[in-house]
Every structure is written in C-alpha cells, then in structure tokens.
Amino acid sequence: MTILYEIYDNLYVNLTNRCPCACTFCLRQDRDEMNHSGSLWLEREPSVEEVKREFDHFDMTKYKEVVFCGFGEPTERLEDLLEIAAFIKERYGLPVRVNTSGLADLIYKKDTAPMFQGLVDTVSISLNTPDKADYHRLTRNRFGEESFDALLLFAERVKQYVPKVVLTTVETTITKEQEKKCQEICDRLGVFYRIRPWESNTLS
C-alpha cells in the first residue's frame, strides 16, 4: 500500500479511503494514483505504528512539510492523524499541514478545532464555491446544505489554534466573480484564499 508519497518538496500521508464527499472534480473519480506514487487506494487503513515506521524509508531532510491528504478525508481518522503529527514534530521537527473538507465537526458532532493546537501548522480547507447550494451540488457530501456553514464555522474556530488557515477553490471550476466572493468570505473570516491548479486538485 502507498502510505507515504512525495509531491515536489513535501511528503504526503495517506491514511484512509473514507470521505464524506464525492466531489464532481476530484481526481479520484477517474484515477487511483498521483505523480507515479502508486495506487493511493488503500487495501485497509494502516495502523498508527505502521505509518510511523513508514517514515524510516524516507530521507526526511528533503521535505519542507508533511501533509495529511491522500485519496480520503484525513480527519476521518482525526485522533490517529494528531498522534502521527505529534510524532512528526517530535522526531523530525517539520511543519504539518492538513488538507481537509473542513467537515470534521459534522463527522464527530463536536467542535474539533482545539484538538489541532500545537500539532498542525496549516489547515487547508476546500471551500470550492461561495454558494451554499452550489457547495452541496459540487461536493455531494452526506451532510446536506448545513455542511457549508459548518465548514466556515470550523475555519473561524480553527484559526484560533493553527497558525495558518487557508480556504481553497480549484481553478476553472467557478467563475472569476465567484472567486471574488470567495476572497470576500476569506477576508471576513480572517483566513487566506488560494486558487489551486486543476492538475493538483485536492492532492496538494
């Protein structure tokens, strides 16, 4: 199984296939690998100890940060993610980023933002669109239209505990006017806005 894989100067952690969304533009709709990484579809979810051991196979001095991403939603295994993040920081002293749908609060039915404190340096949240109805149409997530407001609330909360919070959209999937509205949302929340290239989609 591909548990860890490289993209540019970063090392990515692939924890799960599970995801609350089935985004219309997601790369996993039509492929199972990224940058010749091998299949990112996991035969089973690796244990925390398996993930930790996997780092021994990589030269960790090469990387700028470690990113939790993969083909599933990493916060589906939030406690395991945070345990591994603590290990990364203690052993390698590298920054940790989590690429997420921002729906952890709905997954766990509680405010998860405080759990990230001291363990995660950047949270990158897929905003996708400035419109609540469009968000549900694009992401086809299992929580319904309440998910958009939950995502924004999570972003507002988690910025209290994480140094950098970024909301992202994918270029060419929305209009320039919609991108402007996304920027306004980010300005209101006090977080960064990034337009991701199509080719790297949800995996960067």
Image: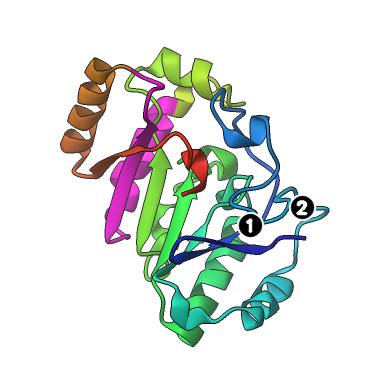
Query: Which residue has dot 1 on it?
Result: 14
Mark before the other along the chain sequence, 2 or 1: 1
Residue 103 in view in this figure = no
Give the x, y percent position of residue 94: 41, 76
Number of numbered discs visible in the structure rendering: 2
Using residue 116 as the reference point, say whether residue 161 is left or right of it.
Answer: left
Q: Amino acid at mark 1?
A: Asn
Q: CA distance from mark 2 to mark 1?
A: 8 Å
Q: Is residue 90 above or below residue 82?
A: below
- Residue 165 picture location, percent across and down: 30, 50
x 33%, y 40%: residue? 167
Quadrant of residue 62 in the image?
bottom left
Secondary structure of the residue carrying numbered label 1? loop
Instruction: State which quadrant residue 30 falls in.
Output: top right
Bounds of the magenta segment:
148-174
Left or right of 190? Residue 20 is: right
Q: Which quarter of the rendered picture does the N terminus lie within?
A: bottom right
